[in-house]
Image (cartoon, grey):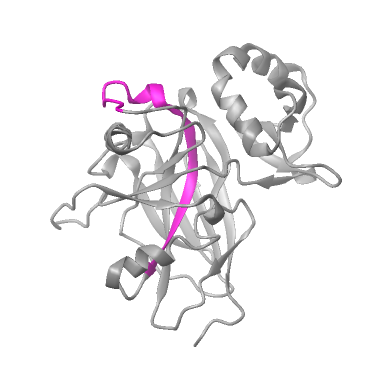
Amino acid sequence: MKFVAFTAPGRQPAVGMLVDGGVIGLAEMLGPAESAQAAMQTLIDGFATLRPQLERLAQQAAPQPVDEVRLLAPLHPGKILCSTGTFALPGAEPAPLLMTLKSAESVIGPGETIQLPDVDASWDFVPEAELGVVIRGPAKQVSTDNWRSAVFGYTCVVDVMGRGDTTFGRDYWLAKADTLGPLGPCIVTADELVDPRLLRVRSWQNGQPRQDFAVGEALYDVARLVEFATTVMTLYTGDVLACGTSPVGLAPIGDGDRLEVAIDGIGRLPLAVAALAGRKS
């Protein structure tokens, strides 16, 4: 199954199920919620119980056409953990597995705009296309044998990274800026994508191919990432692990660019790029 957050004219953001004919709203099923984020967490936590009802809705309900709604980022996670060292250039020495954090404020959704930080022209920003793992928690000390128990589903993630002054980790600090963590367009449940290693991640910049790699090429698979993250901190429902990216095909983005990321079985995440009005040249 595929789940989205969406809005329509005159309506508050809500959670829906994405089917061939469009989007089926789930507000009535899920009950009152403070936000679409809260509703999505309720859906994830209660999915096993709700599944028969969801399957009936998928067969019987009349969906609203996708072109009549606006898809939003399906989640604004409490934590986004971005894996580094997951992939290596051919012949290069493997790097140790590490993770950095991004905030919920970094998240934007389909069709929204990446706003590049206001820094001088010595900086480049590169959009790292990645598989995102959506957590069902709480998850702590999860072993590689039991990693699936902590995974609800998958989404597309773009980890926009800065390349410039690395003093005191300034590049990682700038990468935490608002809008530099797009995700979406939907969450696909884990049962639909049984082996994430078989997925292919692709990106395009202004229509030109950029990244194209298989998740299975990673030095560290999803099971290892879940284990590694949960040895350090507790992951809660709706948190996201970004599984790292291949360095092959990465290129800087700039003002006015159009970016698109796609992952097999999940969908396409289109984005715009803009420099802040006061950016120094």
**Furthest-bottom residue in view?**
281
User: Which of the 4 image quarters holds residue 276?
Assistant: bottom right
Q: Residue at x 50, y 60 (%)?
A: 180
Tell me the magenta residue range: 141-162
Q: Residue at x 35, y 69 (%)?
A: 170
**Furthest-right residue in view?**
10
Q: Is residue 234 left or right of residue 277?
A: left
Q: Position of residue 141 (x, y in %)?
A: 29, 27
Q: Position of residue 10 (x, y in %)?
A: 86, 45
Q: Position of residue 75 (x, y in %)?
A: 57, 41
The image shows residue 12, relative to residue 279, as above or below, that is: above
The image shows residue 87, relative to residue 144, as above or below, that is: below
Q: Is residue 38 left or right of residue 176?
A: right
Q: Is residue 216 left or right of residue 76?
A: left
The image shows residue 168, relative to residue 17, as above or below, that is: below
Between 43 and 246, the one lying in front of the other is 43
The image shows residue 188, relative to residue 243, as above or below, that is: above
